[in-house]
Amino acid sequence: MVTPPPDAGPRATVVATPYRLVRATALVLGLFVAGAAGYTLVEGVPWWDAFYMTVITITTVGFGHVFPLSPAGQVLTVALLGAGIGVFLFLASEVGRSIMEGELQRYLGHVRRVRMIERMSGHDVVCGYGRMGRAAVDALRRAGRRVVVVEARRELTGDLAEAGCPVVTGDATREASLRAANVEHAAGLVCCLADDANNLYTVLTARSLNPGLVIAARAVGEGAEQRIMQAGADEVVNPYQLGGERLAHLLFEPAGAQSASSTASLAPAGPSGPASGRGGASGAAPDRASLSEPRR
């Protein structure tokens, strides 16, 4: 799978035909065209007669001459026979190598996944398969939702492909990649790329393709939440701010204090006993001033 150019169709973003098979097939077709053109120029015969003569020569059928051959035509026939045998042997070896190495099987698997994505509706699209994207995919799959992942780095999505999860290898900011994920018929989109500008552009593109899409996006930079919301996101999450607030809440929320005290009880007790200053289940509220003082 390769990253498609900007004008590539949706299928090209998911399926990359084995290069060696394409090269070998192109050589065979090129040999037929060259032989027909050669007979047309050398013998001055119509194109179809030249092509038919090329076919029976390269395939060694041996039906006889379609038209009388000049010495130059005989030389061309001998050259076509030798080249044809060599090219067909090369094609057979490439097909066998693709089968042995599993390349053809992977290609057919890609084709099946492309067709599966094209038939999907009401699914969720996750753009970016880093640490946050992986967590989002796991949560969605645990909830029984169908997921399509869009990720430019193929090495990150190998486990998903092996598990049969549809993967589009491409840049999520490109319309072709989102179309390959069938975002027009999706129900939701999670955008968790590493860069705020890429998240904003992906949200903007996805919203233009599917106005009814529910979009949740990640933001990191200051003020990025508002810009991404304006681009069309329904919800924007800053993971660092959210994580920091949660850590702070663990210090003064009752449930968090219980969890903290149970964790602290595993450590050696200090002079005042375990978790004596944080408020346990009986729960004196912690000193707010002490939260603002840096720990030494």
Image: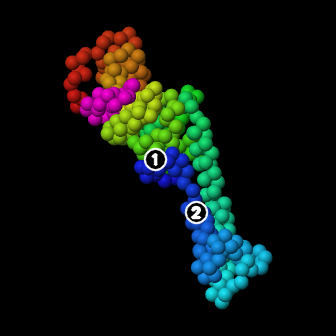
* Side of 231 where 128 appears, left or right: right
Task: Say which residue appears at 35% left-offset and 38% top-offset.
Answer: 201
- Residue 170, which numbered label? 1
Choose top left, top right, bottom left or bottom right for residue 23. Answer: bottom right
Query: Mark 2: which secondary structure?
Result: helix
Can you say whether 32 is above or below 120 in the image? below
Name the one closer to the observer, 157 or 187.
Answer: 187
| Whole-number angstrom distance, CA of label 1 to CA of label 2 | 22 Å
* Side of 9 where 27 appears, left or right: right
Q: Is residue 195 visible?
A: yes
Q: Amino acid at mark 2?
A: Val
Closest to the camera, between mark 1 and mark 2, is 2
Residue occupying the far bottom of the picture? 71
Can you say whether 225 is above or below 284 in the image? below
- Residue linked to disc 2: 22
Q: Amino acid at mark 1?
A: Gly
Of mark 1 and mark 2, the one earlier in the sequence is 2
Choose top left, top right, bottom left or bottom right for residue 263. Answer: top left
* Side of 292 where 188 appears, left or right: right
* Side of 191 where 16 appears, left or right: right
